[in-house]
Amino acid sequence: MNQISQGGSYENQTFMSIEDPDFSDGEFYKCTFRDCELPGRTISSCKFEKCRFERCNLATTQLMGSSFIDCKFDSCRLSGIDWSLVNASMGLKLVCNKCDLSYSMFIRVNISRSQFTKCKILEVDFTEAVLRECEFSGSDMMGSRFNNTDLQKADFRKVRDYVFNPAQNKCKGAKFSRVEAENLLLPFGIEIDDESA
């Protein structure tokens, strides 16, 4: 199926290479979106529940008032998205595998228990976001910003290039790999010498 109409309701449908879709006021339940090119589109007041996105380009998409409930993204471009525009009243739990979320914004957004596996998370703004129990295994987080962010019980093991000040964030119970955890000392100007006396 390749056509999406305003206000449409879809269940267990597969959409591939959608042509001129009207993503407004639609409802999608257990639908699959595959190889869809939707950069810069506006997706307004849509509800996606238990949907799967595979190899889709959603870069700089405007998600105005739309909701994503238990959705999975695999090998998708999700860069430049302002997730604060999403309707998160039903929760926003993302499961992303090998996705590019670079230059996105999660300011004041609660994405607790989300999973990001082998993702590019470059220059992402997590200011005042809630990332409790999130997993970032194998992801690159170079340049991402954490300020007054709730990172309690988040898992940063096997994550590359993150730097943030633990004193300015909530980190109780968070997990870190020993080598990468040294980055947490950089804001304090501390140098670690591995040489024994």
Image (cartoon, rainbow, N blue to C red):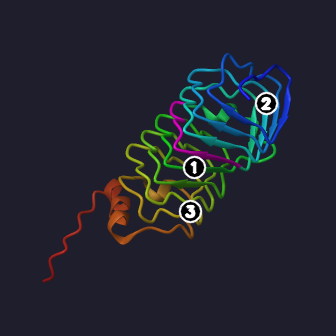
Name the element at disc 3: loop
Q: Amino acid at mark 2?
A: Cys
| Residue 35 placement: quadrant | top right
Q: Is residue 75 magenta?
A: yes
Farthest bottom residue in view: 197
Q: Earlier in the sequence, mark 1 or mark 3?
A: 1
Identified at 80% across, 20% down, the residue is: 5
**Quarter occupied by the N terminus:** top right
Q: Amino acid at mark 3?
A: Ala
Query: Mainly helix, strand or loop, the magenta region?
Result: loop
* Residue 95 picture location, percent across and down: 62, 51
Of 141 and 171, which appears nearest the observer?
Answer: 141
Q: Is residue 71 left or right of residue 61?
A: right
Of 26 and 135, which appears nearest the observer?
Answer: 26
Magenta highlight range: 71-80
Q: Which mark is residue 154?
A: 3
Q: Is residue 111 left or right of residue 9?
A: left
Asked if marks 1 and 3 touch (Cβ < 8 Å), the reply is no
**Of the two numbered discs 2 and 3 in the rendering, the one whose residue sits closer to the viewer:** 2
Of 93 and 10, which appears nearest the observer?
Answer: 10
Identified at 34% across, 61% down, the residue is: 185
Q: Identify the residue position indicated by label 1 in the image.
A: 96
User: Mark 2 and mark 3: span between their CA atoms?
Assistant: 29 Å
**Quarter occupied by the C terminus:** bottom left
Q: Is residue 144 left or right of residue 45?
A: left
* Residue 81 picture location, percent across and down: 57, 31
Q: Earlier in the sequence, mark 2 or mark 3?
A: 2
Q: Identify the residue position indicated by label 2 in the image.
A: 46
Q: Amino acid at mark 1?
A: Cys
Q: Is residue 4 magenta?
A: no
